[in-house]
Image (cartoon, rainbow, N blue to C red):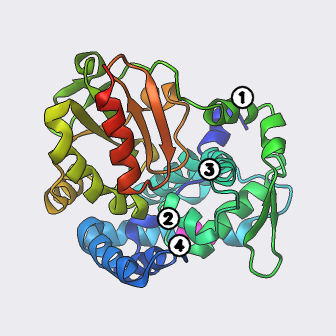
Amino acid sequence: MAHDDVLRLTAAFGQGRSTRERETAIRSESSMTKATLCLTTCFLFAILVAPASGSEQAAQAAAETRVLSYIREHLQAGQPLLVTELYNKVFTQPEERKALDKLYGAFFRIPFFVAQYQEKFGSAPSLSVIAQQFDLPNAEAADTLLRVMESDPRVPRFLTRDPVTHEITKVDVEGIRRDSKFGQQLEHQLSGWEGKPAPDFKLATLDGSVVDFSSLRGKVVLLYVWFTGCPPCLKETPALVALNRDLAARGLSIVGANADRLLGLSYDDAVRQRYIKEQGVNFRVVHWTKESDSAYGGISIFPTQFLIDRKGVIIHHWVGFVPAEDLRSAISQGLAQK
């Protein structure tokens, strides 16, 4: 199978999940999160970003369940799943092929996410965290996604997992770095962005206008890359709204780059507009593109944020949730620079 075929083999199955499953996923986000905050997040997440019910969503959810069950039952060690064969012979309905397209799109993101998470946090992500990051319905789906990788001889053996719980116990980051398919891009992601010129971007807003990075020169720009269904992103949003309210007049410009389309997620502009309205989002929201994602190293952990100074140089790069006080301090320092 061609390299491009492999690139799109696995993805998230989360857009058809139930409210109860979404709440369960959020409750498992972090053992360090206080119970009251977690319960609030669960409630808001279920209310704000769950796709509207209806026959179309039900059909898509059923199709994704069929695809996931088939993959789980037919995985064989050392035998890669052939997406083209599944596409042409097994799953021929539009909803099923849409689910396969999502799988196909996330396959190469998994090693990058796991490696970057290990480097950032000093431990491997749990199956629940992987489920959140890839919009999967539950930890079992994340386990299936990892089993697909482990069954494919072309993917480096970079994970050690507990045979009983199936949780990841060790990540061989150096092994991924040495691999010809993964190493160069992973090195690009982990090498650090501070002090480098920010790549240009031209990104379309939800209403069809364009945000051009060149037009933002002279401002301090916070480029915030997220997707609709990402619990840490929901947790980050109130801080960004407050920062934009307090600091826009001093020269801060926040650009919220939504990656739903890039990731093949089913959320449409109506869901995104609903999220924006309910959260009181007061900064521009644009569609993240394949070209910009590549220019910024390929985003593996959501949210990811780049703080860019008035001269167009990246002065901070964060992956994952960032406390509001850390963002405010870094942005204030950036605004104070001439």
Q: How crowded is mark 1: few (under 14 residues within 10 Å), some or many (20 or more)?
A: few
**Quick one: label 3 or label 4, which is nearer the N terminus?**
4
How many angstroms separate mark 2 from mark 1 (CA)?
26 Å
Residue highlighted by disc 4: 30
Residue highlighted by disc 3: 113
Instruction: Identify residue type, mark 1.
Output: Gln
Residue at image point 50% right, 29% down: 296
How many angstroms separate mark 4 from mark 1 (CA)?
31 Å
Give x and y (percent) for residue 54: 24, 72
**Quick one: label 2 or label 3, which is nearer the N terminus?**
3
Instruction: Assign a secondary structure to mark 2.
Output: helix
Instruction: Identify residue type, mark 2.
Output: Gln
Q: Is residue 54 left or right of residue 89?
A: left
Give x and y (percent) for residue 34: 44, 79
Instruction: Identify residue type, mark 4.
Output: Ser
Magenta-span inclusion, residue 190: no
**Quick one: label 4 or label 2, which is nearer the N terminus?**
4
Q: How crowded is mark 2: few (under 14 residues within 10 Å), some or many (20 or more)?
A: many
